[in-house]
Amino acid sequence: MNCEQAQPLLDAYLDGELEPEKKAQVEQHIAGCAECAAALARLRRLQELFIAKAPHYPAPPELRNKILAGLEAEKRRRFMALARLPWLCAGALLILSICLAWPHFFPNRESRVAHQAVSNYVRAAILEHLCDVVSPDPGVVKPWLAGKLDFSPPVVLPGLEFQMRGGRLDVIRKRKVAALVYKRDKDLATVFVWPAAGQPLSQRTWSLRGYQVSAWNGAGLNFVAVSNMSAAGLAELVGRLKNEVK
Amino acid sequence: MGDASRFEELFLPHLDAAYNLARWLGSGDQDAQDIVQEAYTRAFKGFAGFRGDNPRAWLLTIVRNTAYTWLKKHANHEKIVPFDEEIHAVPAEPAPNDRFDEVRRGQLQAALNRLPTEFREVLLLFEFEGWSYKAIAAALNVPVGTVMSRLSRARRRLQQEFAHVQPEEFDDEL
């Protein structure tokens, strides 16, 4: 190893950062080279001077307290974040409950119609006054209703095991409507019909107070069927009525 | 929250080292205090991720990174105070030995002040903190060769400074 190779390695040699092989080579060179040995000695003296005299800045006493205060603040922030969590959950729950309960307290027009249809259905059953005109024949029921109403309701036979019991007048949303009563075995279904008049019902079903309700719109008329049948049973009746009234 | 007391136990003993590093990286007292405080907050936030067995090195790395961000942000505010701003007060009637000491101290401080921050940094971490080249390289995210050359160039610069300041006394000495 010559001076040119040794000199860049002097720092690492001094710092004990050379691999054993390189270290041995540098050592060997220094042993025979006064110039490099002197350079190394100068480096060593500089290092000693540096370690002895380089400035050291002790932390001001108040810094410790500032840091402790900062940590306290950070801890508090964490705690507050943690403490807020239950309230956030409670708030979210409350909002969710309100959203879910909203339609119950403030039902929209359609569900108000459905509720009233169920009330009518129940009242008629309790009063045992299902029909003003009792007949299985649409040819009797239809003219009778048409004579009492400002429109002519479609009175159709759904067929199969559904039988017509008759019809009556009823009121939904302060409007006179036709109520057609059908029967299957012991189950009763009442279909309320009135002109949509710009307020058509959208197709929907409900399950209210144990009754199945189905609403739809067709031929410019609104229909709401209420029954104590199963949902499938009512759906079948509704499907047949829709087929007949086009 | 038992974490918090463990954190203080592990890291508060290194407050001096943290503050010293911040000063060496070129900040004045106020900035250094702010930097160290921010570094402790950062360390506390990241404490959950601390797995090492060397809290001092971990803390100093955070101080260093915080300091660079801080100094960059405040560079245009002329907040960087000269490194040698605070020089130990010279006793009124210094003994000749003390006097010589003070001169040396002042000269070294002035010379260090003229070094680039990167040079001062490796000097401090190697000579005072006793980190290996490899450890410094890892903390600074540079190759080991860069650490070696920075250290070596820093020493050459210091030697030149001293030769320049007081040729008759240091020329052959350093």
Image (spheres, rainbow, N blue to C red):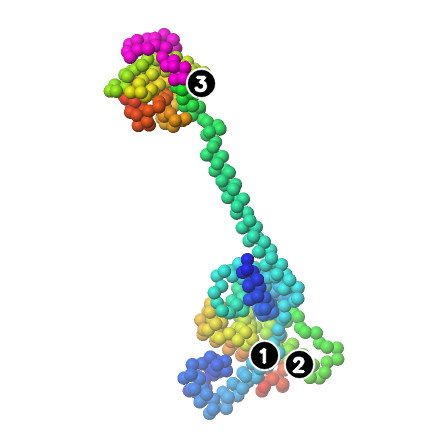
Label pair 1/3, CB-CB below 8 angstroms: no
Q: Is residue B140 above or below residue A196?
A: below
Q: Which mark is residue A51?
A: 1
Quadrant of the rendered structure where residue A201 is?
A: top left
First to last magenta residue range? A123-152
Report crowding for label 2: few under 14, some 14 to 19, many 20 or more residues within 10 A (C-alpha): some
SS state under label 2: helix
SS state under label 3: loop
Quadrant of the rendered structure where residue B84 is?
A: bottom right
Give the percent coordinates (x, y) of residue A58.
63, 70
Q: Which mark is residue B101?
A: 2
Name of the residue lying farthest toward the bottom: A32
Question: Is label 1 on the same chain as label 3?
Answer: yes
Residue A139 in magenta stretch: yes
Report crowding for label 1: few under 14, some 14 to 19, many 20 or more residues within 10 A (C-alpha): some
Residue A54 in magenta stretch: no
Query: At x 31% / y 20%, what residue is drawn?
Result: A186
Q: Which residue is mark 3?
A: A173
Q: Amino acid at mark 3?
A: Arg
Chain ID of residue with mark 3: A
Report crowding for label 3: few under 14, some 14 to 19, many 20 or more residues within 10 A (C-alpha): few
Give the percent coordinates (x, y) of residue B173.
58, 86
- Specify the quadrant that holds the N terminus of chain A: bottom left
Label pair 1/2, CB-CB below 8 angstroms: no
Query: At x 75% / y 77%, what residue is drawn?
Result: B92
